[in-house]
Every structure is written in structure tokens, then in C-alpha cells.
Amino acid sequence: MSLLDVTDLHVTYANGAQAVRGVDLTLDAGQKLGIAGESGCGKSTLALALLRLLPADTKVTGEILLDGEDILTMKWGRLRAVRWAGASIVFQGAMHSLNAVHRIGDQIAEPIILHKTTPASGVKKRVAELLEHVGLPASHAQAYPHELSGGQRQRVMIAMALACAPRLIIADEPTTALDVMIQAQILRLIEQLVAEQDLGLIMISHDLAVLADTCDRLTVMYAGRVVEEGPAGQVYEDALHPYSKALSAAFPRIGDPASRFAPRGLPGDPPDPSDLPSGCTFHPRCPVALGVCSVEDQGLREAGAGSGSGAGSGSGSDEGRRAACVHV
């Protein structure tokens, strides 16, 4: 049994916005799954849905199995027990997620005390262990959030996520606004923790290069749907879907002269989730769209299964890769 199985997940907000549409995901312990896409593609909504953190008037359907239990049908008491202890989340923007008037140590201790994962007499020691585990001195437990740097605050968020020894960690843009040196340190730290503790990791980012360097597999989302999935390195280096290609091309490769002259980005913006275009939702921005794309939605298909050409290689090395494109 997989650690996490998500089947046909749909999320619709009260205003009619279809933020997530029919997403399927599978994650095993020790595996790192990256989820990429522009702002507004549904990444963060998906992350919040996995732990039922969305507003009460949001309609969520489908199935989210964590160790075989459906998150969406859990009673409130069981859900509280699962959060932090079964699965935890590292939110983007640590300064906004931490409480400015409480010391760091007290904030890390709170989930430990609530879930009683450590005897009361050992909570202070556990907090010190967690801080040292993420590369911070135990003395930082007495600090307030504003007294720490951005990278240190992000490490505190990771320590909080590990506080109750969960099996699944969801990291939503964990390196946003960090400089490249601190970003590299945080990414290596996350990789190390996943390997040492056999955790499942879902990392969300708009940066394919970061995900390709950190994760085993990569899922690309557009307008609430998965448009491509496969081994992270392959999706980054040789994308099958034109949207994935555009995301990858937006980041120049050092040492590759050709990338200096490649066009960057895409015209336009992702569609309004409450007013999605017909057919393939990407077709208004797609450089290789066909007439059929405006009238027929394209579901995920195995690489090499289509009859068209132009969006990807469709070679025999694409085993385990799928894309929602008529050209695949």
C-alpha cells in the first residue's frame, strides 16, 4: 500500500472557481514528488486539500488515502490526530506562518504537547533536538521570529513539521524569497531528512529546476489539472507537454549557449478557474495547438500513445511518463 493515494480530486470554491480538477497522485515512503506550475494553477489548493485546510464552504470530492485512511471522510477528532503526527505542512512565507509574539521554542513545542508524542518532562529536550537536527543551535528556542534570518525561520518551520514524527511532509514553496545559497542549504536539508527518516515528501514550486534537482518524480499542473508527470529529470530536460516545455525554458541553463537565445515564458496568463475555456484549457496559449484542442479536452496518456508530433520525443526512454497533449 502506498503512503498517499489521491484519486479524482476536485476542489471548487464557493465562487465557482474550479481550482483542482480530477487530480490523481501516488506517493510511497521515502519518495519525493514535485508539483510545478505557475501561480494560480492549483498547487497550493491541492496541498491544503490533502489535510482538509480549505474553507468550510469549499466543495471537495474524490479520495485522499493516507496509509489507507480517507482524509475526506475522517471525523474531526481523527483528523486532528493525523495533522502533525501523520502528515504535516511547511507553509510558504515562514514570517507569516510563525506567531510574532511567541518564542520559537514554544511554537515548536505546541504540536508536541497537543499530540502527547513526548512526555511533558522531555518536551524542552525534544525542541532542542529538533532545532539541532535542522542546523540551528538549541539557544534559538528563546528567540522571536523577527530575531532570525529568513533561512533560519524556514528551518524552524521544517523543525515544526518534524515535531511529531509524521510520515508525510508537504512543503509549499519552502524556499520562496530565500537567496540562492540559503535555498541550496534548505533543499539539501530536506533531502537529508527524507532519506534518514524514510518520509514521503511533496514539494510544491514554480521552479522546475529546483524540483528536478530535489525530487524523484515531477507532476506539472495547469488550470487545476495534471498535464504531465514522470521522472523529474526527464520532465525537466525533455518535456512532453508544451506547457512543461515553456516552464523549463523559462530557466536558462548555465553553460548552454543555445538557452541564452531561447524565447522565455509564454504570452498571456493562466485562465480564470471560474471561467475556463472549452477543450484543452491550455490551447489559447499553446504554440502547437490544433483545431481539435479547442473543442476536445486532452486527458493524460502514456508517452508515445498519440499520433501527432511536435510536443515531445515519444521515445522508448519515456517509460512511466504521461502527458495531456494530442501530440504525445
Image: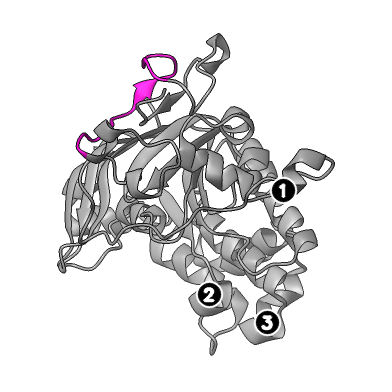
Which residue position holds label 3?
142
**Label 3, residues with CA under 10 Å away: few <14, some 14-19, many ≥20:** few
What's the CA distance linking mark 1 and mark 2? 40 Å
Residue contact at pointers 3 and 1, CB within 8 angstroms = no
Which residue is at the front of the view, 170 or 222?
222
Which amino acid is tagged 3?
A: Gln
As drawn, which residue projects farthest toward the right? 255
The residue under the point 73% across, 47% down is: 261
User: What number is the disc on residue 107?
Assistant: 2
Q: Nearer the viewer, mark 1 or mark 2?
A: 1
Q: Which residues are magenta?
A: 295-308
Q: Please, which residue is most extreme toward the bottom here?
A: 101
Q: Earlier in the sequence, mark 2 or mark 3?
A: 2
Residue at (67% x, 50% y) in the render: 251
Check residue 300 for magenta coloring.
yes
305 falls in the magenta region: yes
Q: Amino acid at mark 1?
A: Pro
The rendered magenta stretch, by its main secondary structure, is classed as loop
Position of the N terminus by quadrant: top left
Numbered circle sitting on residue 252: 1
Between the C-alphas of marks 2 and 3, the distance is 11 Å
Q: Give the residue drawn at x 59%, y 83%.
A: 103
Q: Residue at x 54, y 59 (%)?
A: 173
State the image quarter where residue 125 is shown.
Answer: bottom right
